Amino acid sequence: MNSNYNKIRSLFRDGKTEESSAWKTTENTGWGKEECSYAASFIEREYNLFLENQKEVERKQLERRFQNAAFNQNASGSHGESLRQSATRHPVEAAHSRLDKFRKISFFSLLFICANLLFAEKYTFGGKKGWAEVTVRNGITTGKGRYGYEGLELASRGQSYSENTDLLLNFENSDSQDKSGNYETIQDNLFITKKSKMGKGAAQSRSKQGGITLSGNAGSFFSTEGPAGSFMIEFWLCPSVVENGEIILNWRSSRNFYGDIMYQLVSISFYQNRIMCTFSNIFEGYTQGDGIVSLTGDAPLVPGKWSHHLISYQEDTGELSYKMNGSLNDIKFITSTGHENGTIYQAVMGVPANVEICPKYTGLIDEIKITRSYEDFSKNIEQSATPLTSNRKYNSRGGRIESNPILTKNGTVMNSLTAEMFIPEESAVQLYIRGGDNYFSWTEDYPEWIPVKSGEPIRDLSGLYFQIAADLYPSGDGTQTPSITELVLDYTTLPEPQPPYKISSEKGDGFVTLTWSYSVDDTAGGYYVYYGTSPGEYLGSMALEGPSPINAGNKTRFTVSGLENGTIYYFAVSAWSKIDSRISGPLSKEVFARPEQKAKQSQTGSR
């Protein structure tokens, strides 16, 4: 802070006495109220010293003018006397005039700066707060950010997941936990290794010790009784040995079929150095081969070499297929004709049961994924067989995050969006923000997303709700990803006017008249009247003037009519801002009144 004061002092020493220059220095300091107050007194003190110096300079200049005039033959006596008086009077008057002007400007500048400090607010995503409010994460995963916090970065091509992902074991964070959250680990004998095919980690299985056993939550593929729909099962394998009977996946269950108990099996194993997939009594109505469907690979497995395997079923065509490294190895149509044009037999799962991964397998496995939908990867160049075997770690299309909308206050003005990021060479991050008053009318493209740069001012964006987004792009060779550790929104809320200090109520016949004092804030443009039949609950709707709250305008007396006699009503008043009537301040103290019918006066008279 001393360096800022030195900057201010240098302005005066250099003769740069423009008030805006001095205050420009203070505006960029981020000082608090106490520091601003000290700065104001400091500037005034420095300016007084400057004026004293200026007075001496001007006095000497006028004295020289007087001496020159005295020797001038054309100079009159009165003119010389005038110069003598000026030498004394002018510097003092000029000094006081400048000081008064400077004090006024200093006061309003200080008021402006402190107002910004008082009403400026921040909202943080990430950092120590975490990323729970960033709910859209397309092609994004969590990783290690700066300062020990969790960061967001691009997911490797094999570990991306969406709302249709049922199971994902990618072994990225030195564990075997399901990243989709649909399965819990019952038993885990896998070893995590860095010898991965995709991402940072893989699992090593040793046949005698078994693999990992998972229990699915309600709604998961292996724990939901009934139609399964389309599905895909995929994984990477690098076997140490290729022997008959090695098992990659095993699920055993049963289902009730018209009173009969049917045994069910889904199994992926080794047979004659190849992958064999077996589905027993999974497809309802399919009776060929006693209800057993098998898919067998035509390409042999090679010990010590990675290969990608994909088993998929399409409920709209009945196609069941197996691909190895993107190449079709086997296909069957689960229909009445065995072709595309027959009646389709749908996959139906039985009672929930645990699923075993690598219960009898020796080697490495990576990126085990089950998806509750079907996607034709051949239509996507990035996901086709060629990229699967390439060295690209990240999808060149990058990934995107979007936050939940945050609720601020009416009339909030957005100042900036600042990101704590790590951006390797050739990678990039593009930040976006949007805002508005009615979040419930928003769509994917409305309001328009506004591209912004980290820490730079945001122009002309205000509202009640705000939402942020970011696109992350990898390096050109697809080996490096940017990461975001923290995102901070800086915004200014408009001041809320204070409520009336005094308020009173007067009951009447079916009405109550309220009287209050004006708000002490000159930002108040009018008042709202709140009413109801319970203390602190202003939910009234019976008044002729309208439901609570009632806009009473800029007045200090208001009558609420149409009330029921004998019922007690509670009232409070708030002031609304002249900038925006939607900005309402805190409530006043509560008053109450019970309307009552006036008693009729008895009339007496003589006949």
Image (tube, rainbow, N blue to C red):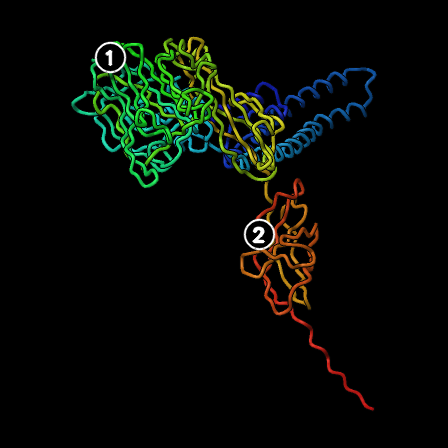
Q: Which residue is mark 2?
A: 587
The residue sitting at 42% across, 22% down in the picture is 337
| Helix, strand or loop status at disc 1 | loop
The residue sitting at 73% across, 25% down in the picture is 84
Number of other residues with Cα within 10 Å of mark 1, as a class: few under 14, some 14 to 19, many 20 or more: many
Left or right of 68 in this view: 124: left
Q: Identify the mark nearer the N-term, 1 or 2.
A: 1
Q: Residue 281 versus residue 434: which sits nearer the camera?
A: 281
Query: Quarter of the image holding residue 307?
Result: top left
Q: Is residue 392 visible?
A: yes
Quadrant in which the C terminus appears? bottom right
Q: Picture coordinates of residue 269 (x, y %)?
A: 26, 20
Left or right of 139 in this view: 258: left
Q: Residue 252 versus residue 398: which sits nearer the camera?
A: 252
| Helix, strand or loop status at disc 2 | loop
Q: Which residue is mark 1?
A: 273
Left or right of 214 in this view: 374: right
The residue sitting at 63% across, 35% down in the picture is 108
Query: Quarter of the image holding residue 69?
Result: top right
Q: Residue 219 versus residue 387: which sits nearer the camera?
A: 219
